[in-house]
Image (spheres, rainbow, N blue to C red):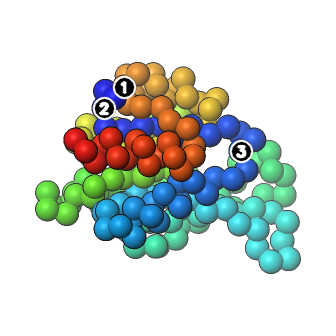
């Protein structure tokens, strides 16, 4: 292991993405300080279109980031809400050294980050500060992530055992 961050890689066809939120829930239950953002996708009652919200892991605050679209091929990303989402990560960076979390989780390395925008600055600053980080990365974007991260960090499977193994190695250092 060459750095204390990892890309948690999932395939585009992977429908069960519960490993990361379940992992975070388990860490928090065992007293590990976890910050960052998870994403929750839902279809509202009586609707056929999906919405996506970023959820602040520390507070539970929900930020709608993708509006329902009639055509799933349309993005629907509310770029303005990325500002609010990025504030969650900036808060990690501005806390005093006594309250820095043990782990930051970012779900996910999306289209905006892949082109150098979105949350990428905050993600890279967290890495530069040496705060352990897990970021979910879609398999087709892994090469972009590795290039942006200097081919450093671990690449792990999007499964509970891999997440736990990685965390035990990080926590032991």
Q: Nearer the viewer, residue 58 or 115?
A: 58
Q: State the residue lying farthest toward the bottom.
A: 45
- Mark 1 neighbour class, 10 Å CA radius: few under 14, some 14 to 19, many 20 or more: some
Q: Which mark is residue 14?
A: 3
Q: CA distance from mark 2 to mark 1?
A: 6 Å
Q: CA distance from mark 3 to mark 2?
A: 27 Å
Which residue is at a point 55% across and 38% down the rendered structure image? 157
Q: Position of residue 135 (x, y in %)?
A: 46, 44
Query: Mark 1 — residue?
Result: 152
Q: Are marks 2 and 1 in contact (CB under 8 Å)?
A: yes
Q: Position of residue 78 (x, y in %)?
A: 60, 56
Q: CA distance from mark 1 to mark 3?
A: 25 Å
Which residue is at a point 67% across and 62% down the rendered structure image? 41
Q: Are marks 1 and 3 in contact (CB under 8 Å)?
A: no
- Mark 2 neighbour class, 10 Å CA radius: few under 14, some 14 to 19, many 20 or more: few
Earlier sequence position, callout 1 versus callout 3: 3
Q: Quadrant of residue 125?
A: top left
Earlier sequence position, callout 3 versus callout 2: 2
- Helix or strand or loop: what does disc 2 sit on? loop
Q: Which mark is residue 3?
A: 2
- Helix or strand or loop: what does disc 1 sit on? loop
Q: Are marks 3 and 2 in contact (CB under 8 Å)?
A: no
């Amino acid at each position: 292991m060459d750095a204390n961050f990892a890309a948690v890689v999932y395939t585009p066809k992977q429908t069960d993405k519960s490993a990361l939120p379940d992992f975070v829930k388990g860490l928090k239950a065992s007293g590990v300080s976890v910050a960052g953002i998870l994403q929750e996708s839902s279809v509202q009652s009586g609707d056929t279109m999906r919405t996506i919200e970023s959820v602040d892991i520390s507070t539970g605050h929900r930020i709608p980031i993708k509006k329902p679209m009639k055509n799933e091929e349309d993005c629907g990303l509310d770029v303005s809400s990325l500002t609010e989402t990025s504030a969650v990560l900036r808060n990690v960076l501005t806390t005093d050294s006594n309250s820095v979390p043990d782990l930051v989780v970012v779900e996910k390395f999306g289209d905006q980050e892949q082109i150098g925008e979105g949350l990428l600055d905050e993600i890279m600053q967290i890495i530069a500060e040496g705060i352990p980080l897990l970021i979910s990365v879609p398999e087709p974007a892994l090469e972009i992530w590795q290039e942006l991260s200097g081919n450093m960090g671990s690449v792990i499977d999007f499964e509970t055992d891999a997440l736990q193994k990685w965390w035990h190695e990080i926590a032991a250092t």
